Image (cartoon, rainbow, N blue to C red):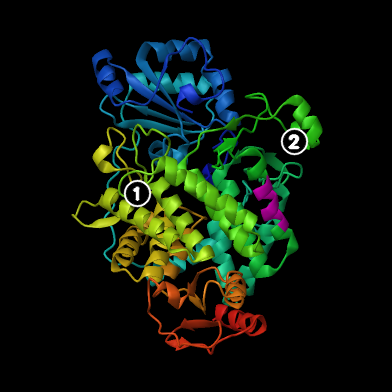
Amino acid sequence: MKHVRTRLFLSLTLSLGLSGGGSCATDSADAGHSKPSGLVWHKWDDSLFEQAKREKKFILLDLEAVWCHWCHVMDEQTYSNSDVKKLLNSRYILVKVDQDSRPDLSHKYEDFGWPATIIFNADGKEIVKRQGYIPPERMTRLLKAIIADPTPEDGSAQQATYQTESFLSKELRDELNNKHIQGYDTKNGAWGTFHKFLDWDSVEYAMQLGLGGDKESEKRATTTLDAQLNLLDPVWGGVYQYSTDGDWEHKHFEKIMQMQGENLRIYSLGSMLYKKESYLNAAKSIASYLENFLTSPDGAFYTSQDADLIPGQHSEDYFTLSDADRRKRGIPRVDKHIYSQENGWAINGFVELYMATGDTKYLDIASKAAKWIIDNRSVEGGGFSHDAKDTAGPFLGDSLAMGRAFLSLYEATADKHWLARAQGAADFIGSHFDNLSADGKSAGYVTADPAKSGVAKPVPLLDENIMLARFSNGLFHVTGKASYKKMTEQTMRYLSTPSVARQRKILVAGVLLADRQAGAPPFHVTIVGGKGDPQARTLYMAALKTPSVYRRIEWYDRNEGNLPNMDVEYPELPKAAAFSCGDGVCSTPAYDLESLTQLLDRRARM
């Protein structure tokens, strides 16, 4: 929510039924703004807990984001308050972490920020977790209360007993579907009524139902896409994080990569499904912003741009200015870290825009970033580090986001090199992030390598497992390899556990998408013809614009050998042709664009 991305925090606040304004969603050395004076801030290190035992102190973790307005305010007001500083210096060891730099901590505590405040005892047990900005007076009361009674607030939490089935029960599926429908804001669009933003899973699920003939779902998708256009920056492009007050006019101006990448993807997909120029223009606007503001000289992507020109001061007036007037005042800080996860999100979006437009510029941008990450973030075994040097990695999110991007690049190009990269990332995930439950069986995957974890034990996260289920399922259908089907089933055992699936009150569509796709084959189109054949390429580019959310597009050139998964035997023909096969039936060959378009429209809606 995205976060988790990480998932964008506001999507989680909303989905959990929370409201309130003092939240946004940077190891202090990288924070990019001044730290409050009179306090000593440390990086996250397990050795601090030994120090806490010796000194009989607690540990306060301040998880913040470099782009977050309320994080700046908390530094300027709360941590600069004399009473707060006195209590902190006497009984607390202080840790500041840029949540973008530590996906393990960010994903684990994303429900509680940003900023997120977590206070531990010396044994590493969480005493309290607090969401968003904490005013000085309330922080003073909290710190005193913990000193007086350090009993953990949620000490009774128990590990879930995971499902043995790898699918949702009918009752649970119906319950989640009802939540999805009831959570939609019929007045203003989107899901939820306070924070307004595009939740990509909810829109994509509505798109998929709409393709099946559900007109109400299609209307929910298009109404939300239309409303989200209000959050596009009309000057620089890109999309603001969210709006408050139940409408689309109270904008918060940070621009974080997951929001850019997923909006880029969804608007590109929407333009193919609904043929609306406004959606394609929105996608191009986001792409232009990423090119101009969040792209490094080497072609990889930066992480985010701050909401504030001056940290802690609202910048609403600034964002009403023209390009020239903005630049006269200065440009809000860009976080120039290059993380694998954020690059995977961006690459995936650019690939989708290439498939929507056929403009090779977007494919070139995606390929260049992917190659940079391969050259600079690869780790042994097919996975990816988060940054140049990970103190606690590897993390699931980096290999997952890049694997998903590689699979998209394979679909867009039919280049088996990208498919091999996607398989390498999936194999790395399978060997490093297994979630072994209390009964000795695996269910889902955890956010960091358990073998390298310390006090902050990695846990399985909902959004990562949703994305992983869909990625591994797509990889299974493309390759036919049983190991990826097994990975999907393991992930679905976690997602279909009632206590997991019910974590959210509104934003439940991701679980429904994963379950729906894991239970059925994708819409399948294959172009049969040589890679050098202009007609075959024309058919392939048309197939990439297929109006389908869940699909498998392939190009079978006999000169290159068989497809990775030859589950269909195609006839030899005198010229290039397209086939659509599924449900035990293959279409007649389509030799031209008109017949292919008719075939795709008919089959995609089945």
Residue at 40 percent of width and 57 percent of height:
422
Residue 307: x and y in percent read 64, 33
Q: For residue 374, which numbered disc appears in the image?
A: none
**Magenta extent:** 281-288
Single out the mark in the foreground, 2 or 1.
2
Q: Is residue 451 above or below residue 36?
A: below
Which residue occupies the extreme left position in the image?
Answer: 440
The answer to whether residue 509 of the structure is visible from this angle is no
Q: For residue 319, which numbered disc appears in the image?
A: 2
> Which mark is first along the chain, 1 or 2?
2
Residue 402: x and y in percent read 44, 51
Q: Which residue is mark 1?
A: 460
The amino acid at mark 2 is: Phe
Residue at 57 percent of width and 73 percent of height:
540
Whether residue 406 appears in magenta in the rendering, the answer is no
Q: Main secondary structure of the magenta part?
A: helix
Q: Nearer the viewer, residue 511 or 82?
A: 511
As helix, strand or loop, the secondary structure at mark 2 comes to helix
Label 2, residues with CA under 10 Å away: few <14, some 14-19, many ≥20? some
Residue 571: x and y in percent read 45, 88
Quadrant of residue 297 within the rendered picture: top right
The amino acid at mark 1 is: Pro
Residue 448: x and y in percent read 33, 43
The answer to whether residue 523 of the structure is visible from this angle is yes
